[in-house]
Image (cartoon, rainbow, N blue to C red):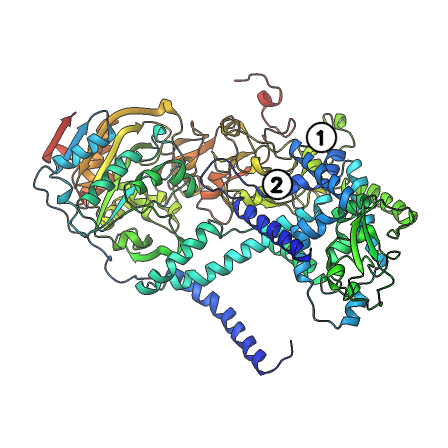
Amino acid sequence: MPMNRKNFFKAIGASALAAGLPGCSGSGGRETAGAVPLHRREPVVTPGPKMAVVTGADPEAITRRAIQEMGGIGVFVSRGDKVLIKPNIGWDRVPAQAATTNPQVVATLVAMCLDAGAARVTVLDNTISEPRRCYMRREIKKAAEEVGAEVPFVENYNFRKVNIGGELIREWPVYRKALEVDKMINVPIAKHHSLSRLTIGMKNLYGLLGGRRNQLHQDVHLSIAEMTAFFAPTLTVVDAFRILIANGPSGGSLSDVRQANTIIASVDPVAADSRAAALFDIDPQEIHYLVLGSQMGIGTLEVESLEVKEVAI
Amino acid sequence: MRTARRISQAFFFALFIFLLIMTEYKGTDEIKYPVKIFFDFDPLVALSTFLAAYSVPKTLLWSLLVVGLTLAVGRFFCAWVCPMGTLNHLLSHNRRKAAEKIRRNRYDKRQGWKYIALVFFIVAAMLGLQIVGFLDPFSVLIRSFALAVNPAFNYLLRAMFYPLLSLDWPWLTALIEPVFTFFRKFVLSFEQPYFYQGLFIGLVFVAIAVLNQVRRRFWCRYLCPLGALLGLFSRFSLLRLQVDEKTCTGCMSCVENCEGACEPQSSQSWIRSECMPCWNCVEACPHGSIKIRLALPRIADRSVDFTKRQVIASIGSAVGALALFRIDGRKVAPSASVAETRESKRFNPALIRPPGAVEEREFLTRCIRCGECMKVCIKNAIHPTLMEAGLEGLWSPYLKMQLGYCEFNCTLCTQVCPTGAIQELTTEQKHQTKIGLAFFDKNRCIPFTLGRDCIVCEEVCPTPKKAIIFEEVEVTDPAGNRVVVKQPRIDPHLCVGCGMCEYVCPLVDKPGVYVTSIGESRSKDNQLLLDVYGSGITK
């Protein structure tokens, strides 16, 4: 290639591009620090009870009933809302192994939100096992997409470093979607966890974080409480249809699974977890992140103090 | 016919790219279209595997079809099918003057190199040294594409999209996110792949590509041992090139366009084993003087020059290579029965083979370093070795747990191996297969050194009954407080060596828990537990 003028400019252009590319990608972890949390959801005032606990053999029926008992999905989701449903899809396990949220429970909630007029329902989780296997083989993607949700894989470029506003966690990379939606429904499964004793709703919110999540265990209780305060889920629906009582949170053995046939729905994330702890015969006072959560004013440990509707179908 | 050839080449090259893209997890536990299909038609791999390991997977018998067709119509495979040939063909284009093209397309004695290389690899395989993967065209092609070309392509596309997507301009995101999602779903790898030595393997490939500017199809003419093997078969083929001397004006247009440098300018000069039947000469001849037809071969036909002396030197080199390759620190005993007593007790802790890999000695007689297991690995854990398995095992697969880990329910790498170096496993068999064993470094592990909780390793340990256990111990933290922390330990009977603990350890530079190869199911000797080695029961 002779070095005439045209080629010379081509070469300049190419090298400028080459030099520019790495500079551009440096902006991947852009900070929005200093600002207040992008999205503070106002707590929903329910006309009915603050918590519903429904037991029964059909996951879909008990999910629907629990929402109905709290006044119906319309209380939580308004027409035109963008809704994020956050199940636990973290592990490459089948639903029977009780390491991930029951796909039927998730699909039921998706359908209800869309019926209530939600503009868009997104289901996602930053998984721990390989994401495709968690999403596809565990059937959550299929079940939720069939009823009209979008179930995107987590993309690296979608994390934004934001001000969390905690004592321990000042700022952290959070998934963009969680900052943008109008309503967030947290749909955890109730499981044993060696470090935090139980992982239910509050810890499930780790799944919206990016960055060095493996450091959070160093102060697991405070980080869980602070993340819950930051995300302030509109509604927590605990899938306790099957619960994992040992070798959690990954499980894998059916002998560690107990059929609890229960759905716990609540606007109070601390109370939801406290009520689920009872299924494991654990006093919520023994779980430090619940104690911290109640001290921080996120919710209450004393489930009895709330108006609770218990139904068996 | 030239058009037909081009269509055929385009088809097989597209097939190769399609299969390469499909050699990834696509939502099902089985790989439906692995790129190993190309190896099934590679007689060089079939022959050398048979010589080195005494058995071949049944699928490799398809290669006999290629042998049969070559016996009939010569090296059609090189010109019509081989994607490596097609790539070299494309890269051979140049704008040299006609006279210069003719000069560079004349037969060159050095085209005998590939036959010498073939003899070397075959003799080495007979001696149990299977190193044909360094030059087998499919091994080179798949390895280069999987470990270098594809990652580089992925990197460029992501480097283009990521900065734009992180600008958070809603209109821009709305415009290009669907494009990126489309690419990610159908063309790109799911995650950006990274490979240890990817750059090095890529540079070797660039060198092969650039050589095409020295001589057209340099690789195919001078280096390719598969081309040499097919060349040997084609000497007995029915392929015949006939030049009508009455109409030929000696313009040399045929030579100017020749792919194989097979001297097509006259029936006497034509070298059958070098001819790729590309039909360029037939199409280029302004007088229609050249015809390719089928006829019985004649003994007087011209053949490639390589001397007895060269063949003997090549055999000698293979013997020498065997000796040199086996005197490194691995202590490879000359006989398997010796291995059980005194030799071969030095195992490399880093040499963690994929699950389903056969015992190391047999593994090396089978692995052809094609890189398919590395391409398909769902967590990008499998990488090519440098010296971990000796020079003999260069570029064979091993797991680097800091870059990825072995996903507990995944069996993909066991499904794509063309030669049986990695045996297919069911998910249940895979769960029982140990590829190594994890150990804690108490001088680094956080609960041991800092008096803080951590046990992320225990959280993620994927065996149904966790192989990482812990005990609550009261320790003094750096500030002098007495605190109770959970200190992890390994249950060696439960640990399968998957390396997820090492992968997630917060000590990201040098993990506080790491996997080494000891305890691997495939080895009888690389064991530490008496009850496993002796197969009895201890308490």
* Residue A8 occupies quadrant: bottom right
Helix, strand or loop at label 1? It is loop
Q: Nearer the viewer, residue B312 or B467?
A: B312
**Amino acid found under the numbered disc labelled 1:** Ser
Looking at the image, the residue that sits furthest to the front is B246
Q: Residue at x 68, y 51 (%)?
A: B80
- Which residue in the structure is indicated by mark 2? B37
Q: Which mark is residue B55?
A: 1
Q: Nearer the viewer, residue A85 or A127?
A: A85
Alpha carbon of mark 1 to alpha carbon of mark 2: how far? 18 Å
- Rendered location of residue B111, percent (x, y): 82, 55
| CB-based contact (under 8 Å), mark 1 and mark 2 | no
Q: Is residue B476 left or right of residue B383?
A: left
**Quarter of the picture holding the N terminus of chain B:** bottom right
Q: Is residue B169 above or below residue A230?
A: below
- The mark tally for this picture is 2
- Rendered location of residue B279, percent (x, y): 73, 57
Q: Is residue B273 left or right of residue B40?
A: right
Q: Is residue A61 above or below residue B132?
A: above
* Residue B350 visible within the image: yes
Q: Nearer the viewer, residue A71 or B236?
A: B236
Q: Residue at x 64, y 55 (%)?
A: B200
Q: Nearer the viewer, residue A14 or A216?
A: A14
Q: Are marks 1 and 2 on the same chain?
A: yes
- Rendered location of residue B344, percent (x, y): 71, 32
* Residue B433 occupies quadrant: top right
**Amino acid found under the numbered disc labelled 2:** Ile
